[in-house]
Image: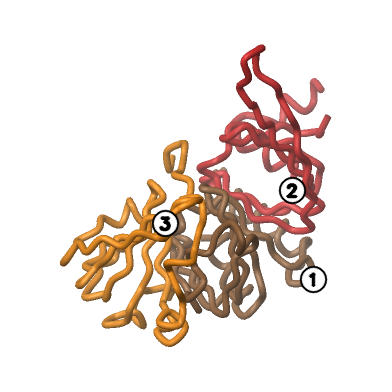
């Protein structure tokens, strides 16, 4: 839930999604859902010479389960806020 | 280390104590990361900053196999938990 | 949210777990991202031969098998000369999703 909320705040940021088959796609984050499926707009593949397969693709839906990493602009996140929210979530799931 | 183990009753307590610290993360596919941990959840999804990734590339050859390492830096990274094998506080 | 809503009746490219590329018209989907594609064509890439296209007809692809669904720019798509494209096929995912 926490990570889902973080991704929602990243809407309209430019991110690079790296898939588990090593394909890297950069684009504008348009939306995410609870499975962390991702919609990207204005996409480009990081190595188009090697991967011409997506040349005519302008936007895409990426299945959350095949994502390895998402590179986020560092300026788009408040790390202190993230840590506080994480501690709160930890406390609520490990209720004591 | 004695007081640390007193604070750690569940595995995730160790991860919580690593918040805003540098951690070492081993991933599937011969990859590992070091970076500062800022967020995680119960799936071990994580958000880290100042990340260095190390990829081990094993290439089989006739005379045994050669191992090459590749390094890459990323400023802010979300890591999906299903690739995570282990998290260790205090990056080596 | 991040749904496939906007892709209904659009020409899309599917990339699958095993590295296959399938182009088709998105006829329907559900919340597990299972997808029905009509008029689909599989595109096989190879490093030293032209892209090969095989007609498959109507397909239902299980969501678990799908990496990515991309909306095709039909004009750009029509302007591409697949017979000139050479590329290694995409890699399959070598370890499971969990």
Secondary structure of the residue carrying numbered label 3: strand
A24 is higher (above) or lower (below) than A15: above
Chain C palette colour: orange
- Observer-side mark, 1 or 2, equals 1
Instruction: Answer left or right for B51 relative to C49.
Output: right
CB of mark 1 within 8 Å of CB of mark 2?
A: no
Q: Nearer the viewer, mark 1 or mark 3?
A: 3
In the rendered structure, find residue C67 and report the number of the disc placed on it: 3
Q: Residue at x 64, y 60 (%)?
A: A47
Q: Chain of mark 2?
A: B
Q: In the structure shown, which secondary structural element does the residue marked by tag 2 occupy?
A: strand
Q: Chain of mark 3?
A: C
Where does the image place residue B47, in percent across and percent down from the top left? 67, 54
Q: Nearer the viewer, residue A31 or A22?
A: A22
Q: Residues within 10 Å of mark 3 (few under 14, many from 20)?
A: many
Instruction: Check the image and report above or below for B6 versus A51.
Output: above
Chain whose colour in the figure is red: B
* Same chain? Circles 1 and 2: no
How many marks can you see? 3
Q: Which residue is mark 1?
A: A75
Relative height, residue B68 to residue C19 (above, below): above
Spatial separation of the CA atoms under disc 2 and disc 3: 28 Å
Circle 2 is placed at which residue position?
B37
- Of tags 2 and 3, which is closer to the observer? 3
Residue B41 visible in the shown view: no
The part of the image, by quadrant, that contains residue C21 is bottom left
Q: Are marks 1 and 3 on the same chain?
A: no
Q: In the rendered image, which quarter contains the C terminus of chain A?
A: top right
Disc 1 on helix, strand or loop?
helix
Q: Chain of mark 1?
A: A
């Amino acid at each position: 839930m926490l990570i889902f909320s973080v991704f929602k705040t990243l809407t309209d940021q430019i991110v690079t999604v790296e898939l588990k088959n090593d394909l890297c796609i950069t684009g504008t984050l348009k939306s995410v859902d609870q499975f962390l499926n991702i919609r990207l707009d204005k996409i480009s593949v990081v190595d188009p010479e090697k991967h011409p397969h997506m040349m005519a693709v302008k936007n895409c839906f990426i299945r959350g389960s095949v994502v390895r990493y998402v590179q986020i602009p560092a300026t788009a996140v408040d790390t202190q806020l993230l840590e506080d929210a994480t501690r709160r979530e930890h406390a609520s799931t490990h209720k004591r | 280390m004695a007081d640390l183990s007193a604070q750690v009753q569940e595995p995730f307590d160790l991860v919580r104590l690593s918040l805003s610290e540098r951690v070492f993360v081993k991933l599937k596919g011969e990859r590992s990361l070091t970076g500062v941990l800022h967020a995680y959840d119960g799936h071990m999804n994580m958000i880290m900053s100042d990340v260095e990734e190390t990829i081990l590339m094993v290439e089989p050859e006739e005379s045994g196999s050669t191992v090459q390492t590749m390094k890459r830096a990323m400023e802010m990274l979300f890591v999906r938990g299903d690739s995570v094998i282990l998290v260790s506080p205090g990056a080596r | 949210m991040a749904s496939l809503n906007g892709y209904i009746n659009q020409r899309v490219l599917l990339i699958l777990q095993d590295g296959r590329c399938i182009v088709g018209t998105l006829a329907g989907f559900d919340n597990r991202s299972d997808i029905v594609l009509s008029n689909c064509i599989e595109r096989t890439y190879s490093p030293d031969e032209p892209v090969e296209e095989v007609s498959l007809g109507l397909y239902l692809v299980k969501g678990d098998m799908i990496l990515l669904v991309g909306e095709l720019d039909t004009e750009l798509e029509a302007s591409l000369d697949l017979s000139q494209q050479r590329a290694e096929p995409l890699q399959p995912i070598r370890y499971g999703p969990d």
